[in-house]
């Protein structure tokens, strides 16, 4: 199309090209030095930006200066992207030689909270795919608990925050996403200490029972009911916990699947591979120690119909893991990597 524009009206095209080049050149001059404790989110926030809108562009522009592709080095300079999410200038028609502002529409999802409710489309790569996301525990069951800086922290709140971030990522790539364990008033939270509450419900709005078997049965029933309505489609279940079962092991992230499920295995492997790649690429001396294995004993793995992967993101009781899990920047990074693994798996289907 551009070629034909060039042929028909080269002078207008050259002017348009010149304008867009000068905008890009200006952007690249904006750099900021990372200070102690800065993450991508806090760095962008200090620039008065919505850090989530600029997150992917920032990574693409600064990839050579990021550890594990998401972490900043203190004292280094980083380029700040200019985000054009509200409007883009499009050439309306060559004949009129006019420009027109076209609004890019975001979709609203109140479950992500006021600040995070808008999902901007990134691609249609996951169109047709259906995902069920379950964060471990919830309702009357907080999961593993620990004390941090004198405050109680609970596994279910952190698993939920990572799950919401993952849901947003998958929605941006046009997937159908069901958040099975849901909290109507929490949303994505950018704090280190996530307050504990007990008002999570099971999709669509069922009160979570106290009894463990009843609790698991309830979420299995919700998933299997939805599964039926999407029969024939690519459907996957991702369960996230923040309490590693493998005690005494210094493990970053575990991935499990049902031994008999080829699709569950492939999803686990795709996410695992993405994590390995992220760690290896920018820090070759560090070995990624996460692994996946069969866990047929898990009730959810056995009873749910979609192929599933079970992810354990460290352990909230472990001091070293706490640093990672409490940092919202890291929760975003984890969600992004899981999302990339999910995309990889869908491409291979
Ligand atoms: Zn758990």
Image (cartoon, rainbow, N blue to C red):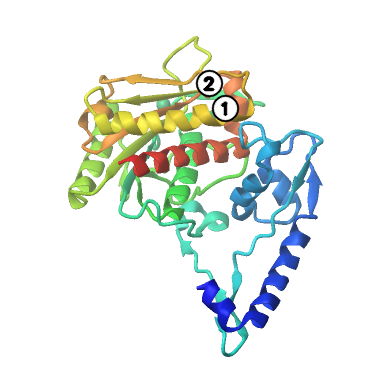
Find disc 2 in the rendering and name its residue. 288
> Does 40 sit above or below residue 210?
below
> Does 319 sit above or below residue 60?
above
Mark 1 or mark 2, earlier in chain? 1
The quarter of the image that holds ligand 1 is: top left
Q: Is residue 241 visible?
A: no
Find disc 1 in the rendering and name its residue. 279
Closer-to-camera residue (153/131): 131
Q: Position of residue 23 (x, y in %)?
A: 73, 66
Q: Position of residue 107 (x, y in %)?
A: 46, 63
Closer-to-camera residue (105/151): 105
Find out whether the residues at labels 1 and 2 contact each other: C-beta distance under 8 Å: yes
Closer-to-camera residue (166/143): 166
> Does 38 sit above or below residue 250?
below
Residue placed at 70% from the left, 77% from the top?
Answer: 15
Q: Quadrant of the C terminus?
A: top left
Residue placed at 62% from the left, 51% from the top?
Answer: 57
Label 2 sits on a secondary structure element that is loop
Q: Position of residue 4 (x, y in %)?
A: 52, 77
Q: Is residue 239 left or right of residue 193?
A: left
Within 10 Å of disc 1 (Cα), the crowding (few <14, some 14-19, many 20+) is some
Within 10 Å of disc 2 (Cα), the crowding (few <14, some 14-19, many 20+) is some
Quote the CA–CA distance across marks 1 and 2. Answer: 6 Å
The extreme bottom residue here reads 96
Q: Is residue 80 visible?
A: yes
Label 1 sits on a secondary structure element that is helix
């Amino acid at each position: 199309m551009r070629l034909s524009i060039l042929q028909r009206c080269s002078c207008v095209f050259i002017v348009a090209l010149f304008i867009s080049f000068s905008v890009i050149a200006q952007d690249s001059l904006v750099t900021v030095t990372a200070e102690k404790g800065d993450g991508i989110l806090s760095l962008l926030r200090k620039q008065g930006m919505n850090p989530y809108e600029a997150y992917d562009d920032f990574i693409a522009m600064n990839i050579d200066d990021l550890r594990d592709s998401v972490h900043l080095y203190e004292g280094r300079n980083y380029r700040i992207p200019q985000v054009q999410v509200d409007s883009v200038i499009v050439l309306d028609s060559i004949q009129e030689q006019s420009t027109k502002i076209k609004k890019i529409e975001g979709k609203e999802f109140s479950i992500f909270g006021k600040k995070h409710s808008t999902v901007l489309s990134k691609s249609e790569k996951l169109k047709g795919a259906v995902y069920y996301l379950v964060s471990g525990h919830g309702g009357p069951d907080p999961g593993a608990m620990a004390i941090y800086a004198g405050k109680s922290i609970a596994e279910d709140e952190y698993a939920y925050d990572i799950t919401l971030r993952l849901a947003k990522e998958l929605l941006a790539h046009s997937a159908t996403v069901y958040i099975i364990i849901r909290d109507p008033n929490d949303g994505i939270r950018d704090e280190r200490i996530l307050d504990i509450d007990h008002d999570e419900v099971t999709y669509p709005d069922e009160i979570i029972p106290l009894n463990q078997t009843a609790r698991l049965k309830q979420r299995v029933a919700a998933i299997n009911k939805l599964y039926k309505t999407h029969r024939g489609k690519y459907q996957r279940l991702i369960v996230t916990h923040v309490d590693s079962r493998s005690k005494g092991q210094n493990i970053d992230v575990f991935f499990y699947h049902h031994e008999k499920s080829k699709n569950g295995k492939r999803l686990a492997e795709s996410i695992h591979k993405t994590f390995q790649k992220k760690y290896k690429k920018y820090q070759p001396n560090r070995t990624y120690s996460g692994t996946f294995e069969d866990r047929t004993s898990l009730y959810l793995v056995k009873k749910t119909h979609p192929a599933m992967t079970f992810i354990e993101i460290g352990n909230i009781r472990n001091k070293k893991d706490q640093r990672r899990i409490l940092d919202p920047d890291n929760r975003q990074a984890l969600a992004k990597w899981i999302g990339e693994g999910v995309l990889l798996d869908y491409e291979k289907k």
